[in-house]
């Protein structure tokens, strides 16, 4: 799987659109280096009951952890979506790599997810 690099001032505010996820799996990882803020916008279509997704971070591009905003309180829970639509995940902090993961779908396997990454914040 390819790794994208976002370690460039020209990419601040740019949107990086990934291949549509049509089954459980992850996007390519993206090296964000010293950027301190990311937003994942993702559009879910053709789902039946629920879709479970997760934004993930890594310091080494091999061991991944959940970037859930309330992870310390909620125990690193994934995000369950119950309707088609466009959603967002916002995270502020320091991490080297990010990726978006389609964890599972209840009942059928018809859902499609289009993830878009936006990078911003302060480059340290």
Image: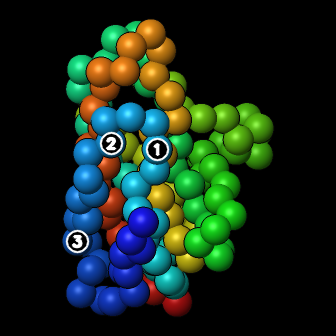
Note whether 13 is above or below 50 in the view shown: below
- How far apart, in angstroms, are the residues tagged by discs 2 and 3? 21 Å
- How far apart, in angstroms, are the residues tagged by discs 1 and 2? 7 Å
Note whether 71 is above or below 123 in the view shown: above
At x 73%, y 35%, the residue is: 74
Tell whether label 3 touches label 2 (CB within 8 Å): no
| Secondary structure of residue under mark 2 | loop
At x 52%, y 35%, the residue is: 103
At x 69%, y 64%, the residue is: 63
| Secondary structure of residue under mark 1 | strand
For mark 2, does the 10 Å Cα neighbourhood hold few (<14), some (14 to 19), or many (20 or more) residues? some
| Residue 37 placement (x, y as % from top left) | 46, 68
At x 65%, y 59%, the residue is: 64
Q: Give the labeled residue for mark 1.
A: 25
Note whether 39 is above or below 111 in the view shown: below
Observer-side mark, 3 or 1, equals 1
Q: Give the labeled residue for mark 3.
A: 14
Q: Horizontally, is 120 left or right of 73 in the view?
A: left
Q: Give the labeled residue for mark 2.
A: 21
Most foreground residue, 64 or 55 = 64
| Secondary structure of residue under mark 3 | loop
Most foreground residue, 84 or 73 = 84
Tell whether label 2 touches label 1 (CB within 8 Å): yes
Instruction: Say which quarter of the image contains residue 45.
Output: top left
| Residue 113 placement (x, y as % from top left) | 30, 37
- How far apart, in angstroms, are the residues tagged by discs 3 and 1? 24 Å
| Residue 108 placement (x, y as % from top left) | 39, 14
Q: Horizontally, is 59 left or right of 96 in the view?
A: right
């Amino acid at each position: 799987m390819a790794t994208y690099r976002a370690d460039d001032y020209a990419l601040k505010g740019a949107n990086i659109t990934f291949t549509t996820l049509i089954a459980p799996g992850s996007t390519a990882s993206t090296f964000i280096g010293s950027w301190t803020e990311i937003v994942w916008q993702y559009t879910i279509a053709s789902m039946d009951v629920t879709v479970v997704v997760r934004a993930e971070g890594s310091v080494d591009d091999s061991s991944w952890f959940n970037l859930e905003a309330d992870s310390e309180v909620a125990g690193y829970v994934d995000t369950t979506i119950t309707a088609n639509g466009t959603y967002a995940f916002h995270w502020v902090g320091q991490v080297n790599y990010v990726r978006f993961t389609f964890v599972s779908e209840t009942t059928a396997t018809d859902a499609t997810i289009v993830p878009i990454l936006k990078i911003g914040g302060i480059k340290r």
